[in-house]
């Protein structure tokens, strides 16, 4: 596979080239690295990366689908990276999302990719970030990064985003209580979805309490009925307003630097892990695993660089 050809097709928006490119990067191959180095930096810098997170069933995929529809109406090309860190296999919830995205299946201006851990250790954050960049380079002006669940790895993945939307809904009491304290660490916007359901008013009131200032609450707390396309246009307007603010006050720049660090660390771990595993299995038998680990690191430092 000629990387220059692939880059050319990718930058022209060819869906198959985009899929191939993401696979190359997921395989952690040298070609993948060369490809990433050749991506259009200006497009990447100009694209907006929006994280969508929240408990399964809250309506993330429905809301994502709605956002895609509105963004398409604005004439934008849109990417979706759907990540399921807890799933050992590609499938399950992610597959469901794929089917829902069939709404846009015939639209060449909507690029979708699902990712699961598939037993891989680490590197998911790196792969998701790379997929988003590949989509941006292919001309997507907005990329939506949807994660399933509310565990630590999902939180790490949405930290890659310029802005994160936490999608909640009535009926998720325990999960929401558990995450309330930390909610503002990850969420730029909180959406109470299923506003047509009983309990949504109370949930919105509960969540309003996490904001110290009324103007923050007005800007950042939002209600939608994603399945009826209610509130999605205003949500997009809020996202735009917040991004404007983040550009001005330096938040966007800071978030991108943090994301860069996070992805770099994940890449380093993903690339090192096979070497470390081989050295650990190579029969190094020290008095203690802690000491054996130090010997492994010394060995690694002595290895010629590839
Ligand atoms: N009543 C109601 N149902 C909704 C709403 N949004 C989504 N749903 C339904 O809730 C279920 C879960 O939605 P989904 O988008 O798959 O949630 P996800 O797991 O967070 O991606 C689906 O059956 C949706 O049709 C809403 O605003 N109101
Ligand atoms: Mg979903």
Image (cartoon, rainbow, N blue to C red):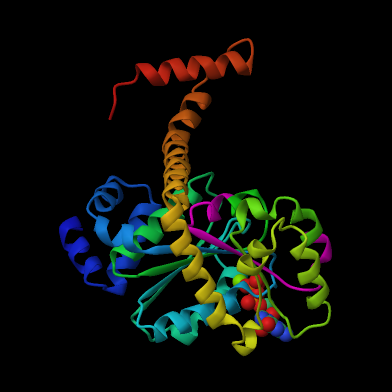
Q: Is residue 83 above or below residue 303?
A: below
Camera-side residue: 86 or 147? 147
- Residue 48 left/right relative to 157: left
- Residue at image x 47%, y 83%? 70
Camera-side residue: 214 or 151? 214
Camera-side residue: 68 or 48? 48
- Residue 275 left/right relative to 185: left
- Residue 162 left/right relative to 192: left
Q: Quadrant of residue 11?
A: bottom left
Extreme residue in the top direction: 287
Q: Is residue 29 above or below residue 205?
A: above
Residue 138: percent from left, percent from top = 29, 67
Task: State yes or no: residue 77 in magenta.
Answer: no
- Residue at image x 67%, y 57%? 150
Extreme residue in the bottom direction: 228
Can residue 92 be seen here?
Answer: no
Ligand 1 is found in the corner quadrant, namely bottom right
- Residue at image x 63%, y 10%? 287
Q: Quadrant of residue 9?
A: bottom left
Residue 220: percent from left, percent from top = 62, 65
Camera-side residue: 238 or 145? 238
Q: Quadrant of the C terminus?
A: top left
Q: Quadrant of the N terminus?
A: bottom left
Q: Which residues are magenta?
A: 156-175
Q: Is residue 225 above or below residue 215?
A: below
- Residue 108 left/right relative to 200: left
Residue 215: percent from left, percent from top = 64, 64
């Amino acid at each position: 596979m000629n990387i220059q050809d692939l880059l050319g097709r990718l930058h022209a928006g060819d869906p198959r080239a985009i899929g191939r490119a993401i696979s190359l990067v997921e395989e952690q191959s040298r070609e993948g690295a060369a490809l990433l180095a050749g991506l259009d930096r200006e497009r990447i810098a100009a694209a907006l990366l929006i994280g969508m997170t929240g408990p399964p069933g809250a309506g993330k995929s429905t809301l994502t689908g709605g956002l895609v529809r509105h963004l398409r109406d604005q004439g934008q090309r849109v990417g979706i990276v759907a990540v399921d860190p807890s799933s050992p296999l590609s499938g399950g919830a992610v597959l469901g999302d794929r089917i829902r995205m069939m709404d846009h299946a015939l639209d060449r201006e909507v690029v979708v990719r699902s990712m699961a851990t598939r037993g891989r250790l680490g590197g998911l954050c790196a792969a998701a970030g790379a997929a988003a960049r590949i989509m941006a380079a292919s001309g997507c002006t907005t990329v939506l990064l949807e994660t399933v669940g509310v565990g630590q790895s999902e939180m790490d993945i949405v930290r890659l985003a310029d802005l994160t939307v936490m999608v909640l809904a009535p009926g998720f009491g325990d999960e929401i209580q558990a995450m309330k304290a930390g909610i503002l660490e990850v969420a730029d916007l909180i959406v109470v979805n299923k506003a047509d359901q009983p309990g949504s008013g109370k949930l919105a009131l509960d969540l309003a309490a996490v904001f110290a200032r009324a103007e923050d609450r007005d800007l950042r707390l939002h209600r939608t009925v994603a399945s009826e396309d209610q509130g999605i246009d205003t949500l997009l307007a809020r996202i735009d307003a917040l991004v404007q603010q983040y550009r001005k006050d330096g938040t966007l720049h800071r978030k991108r630097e943090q994301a860069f660090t996070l992805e770099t660390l994940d890449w380093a771990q993903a690339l090192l892990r096979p070497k470390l595993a081989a050295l650990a299995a190579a029969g190094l038998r020290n008095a203690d695993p802690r000491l054996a680990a130090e010997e492994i690191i010394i060995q690694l430092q002595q290895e010629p660089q590839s």
